[in-house]
Image (tube, helix red, strand yellow):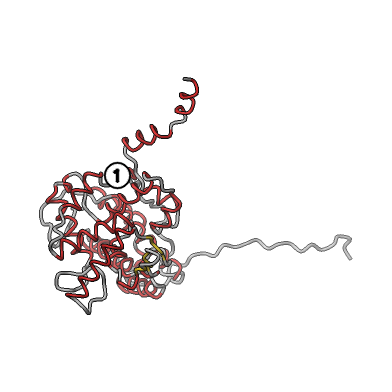
Amino acid sequence: MSDERSIKRRRTKVEKRANDSTDIQPMALEPAFHYFITAKIGEGIRDRTRDDYSNTWRYFTGWLAEENYDVTYVHEITTEICRTYIHYVTVEAPRYKGHKYIQTDQGKGLSAATINMRIRGLKVAFNFWYREGFVRKNPMDNIRCQKVDEDKIKSFTDEQVEALLGACDQRSYVGFRDYVFQWTLLDTAMRMNELLSLKPEDIDIKTRSVTLAARFNKNRRVRIIPLSAETVKLLMELIDENRIHFPHAEKVFLSCYGDEVQDTQMNKRLKYYGDITGVGKEIRSTAHTWRHTAARNYILNGGDPYTLMRLLGHSSINMTRRYVQMTADDVRIKHDQFSPVKKFRTRLR
């Protein structure tokens, strides 16, 4: 018998070796995307997100066909192909290609925001296919989103706000509806789809507030938005008009025929007021610009950023900070009001 005691040694770990024929399940491009989007719908994604994924994949596979890439299965798409595509949309892709109304040459190279949306969409899709065993690795793993200049976000000046509101002919139904719509955007900082989804029963006159259902909010949470007395009065006046002319209508903001107003229709109306006032030459006249204007003025009037974050429906203060872009004049005026030297200057004198 040996004097040495036996020792149980750890076995050396052997890495699993990839096998080109058995380590993945080959899946053709279109069936793979159909499987992906079906799974995402099952997870409860919004219609807008579904459309974004579909458009991203359509643009990408369209480019593959135009460039004659011999790609049949999703696992054949490499990082090199993806980087070449990102370079194409950054430098060479025609802007507004295939647009229904814009046919003139608008230059080449898409915006960083559009490119980033496509990068994120492809990342999500390939991550899904990697987990399902359709690809060996995500070719988008090392591709980062482009940097976006956050300081480009602008808001209306006081003079522009007065011009846009004053351009609404309140003697007509549509003009009054547009006035109430813009006024409510300024008071509440609501999103376009949130305000267009508003029903009379969503408005609580006693508490002067609007209750937005979770399905209309990006973060899927119920949101209660306070209203000023002037806004409640205008909304109730519009609702009374609707009941007279369109007694069976369910929404607050309606077309002149009593139909629900779509976001494309209202965007055209907002652009119209920007055009006739000249404001549109200086800044985009959109619901999003009204939202930024409301956020900026809330802070300038003494509101705190954390309450504003709740009003805007943001999940982080960083996103709210992007909405509050102060001008040089804003900073100067606040500095004159709150500079620490004012206290010491008075004492020394």
Q: Give the residue at the far top of this rendering.
A: 349
Give the image quarter of residue 42. bottom left
Relative to 168, does residue 48 appear above or below in the rendering? below
Q: Give the residue at the far left of this rendering.
A: 104
Q: Can you give x and y, in whole percent of width and height, for residue 39 in the image?
A: 39, 74
Q: Nearer the viewer, residue 166 or 321?
A: 166
Relative to 134, does residue 86 appear above or below in the rendering? above
Q: Can you give x and y, in whole percent of width and height, for residue 79 in the image?
A: 36, 56
**Can the viewer see residue 85 in this picture?**
no
Relative to 238, does residue 149 appear above or below in the rendering? above
Q: Secondary structure at mark 1?
A: helix
Q: Can you give x and y, in whole percent of width and height, for residue 199 in the image?
A: 30, 71
Give the image quarter of residue 246. bottom left
Q: Mark 1, residues whose alpha carbon is within 10 Å: few (<14), some, or many (≥20)?
A: few
Q: Nearer the viewer, residue 196 or 14?
A: 196
Check disc 1 and report the residue beneath it. Answer: 152
Give the image quarter of residue 272. bottom left
Q: Can you give x and y, in whole percent of width and height, for residue 28 in the image?
A: 32, 71
In the image, is 109 to the left or to the right of 205?
left
Residue type of the residue flagged with mark 1: Lys
Quarter of the image with the N terminus in it: bottom right
- In the image, what residue occupies the spot 27% across and 53% down? 290
- In the image, what residue occupies the spot 19% across and 44% down? 282
**Can the viewer see residue 236 in this picture?**
yes
- In the image, what residue occupies the spot 38% across and 60% down? 226
Q: Nearer the viewer, residue 79 or 47?
A: 47
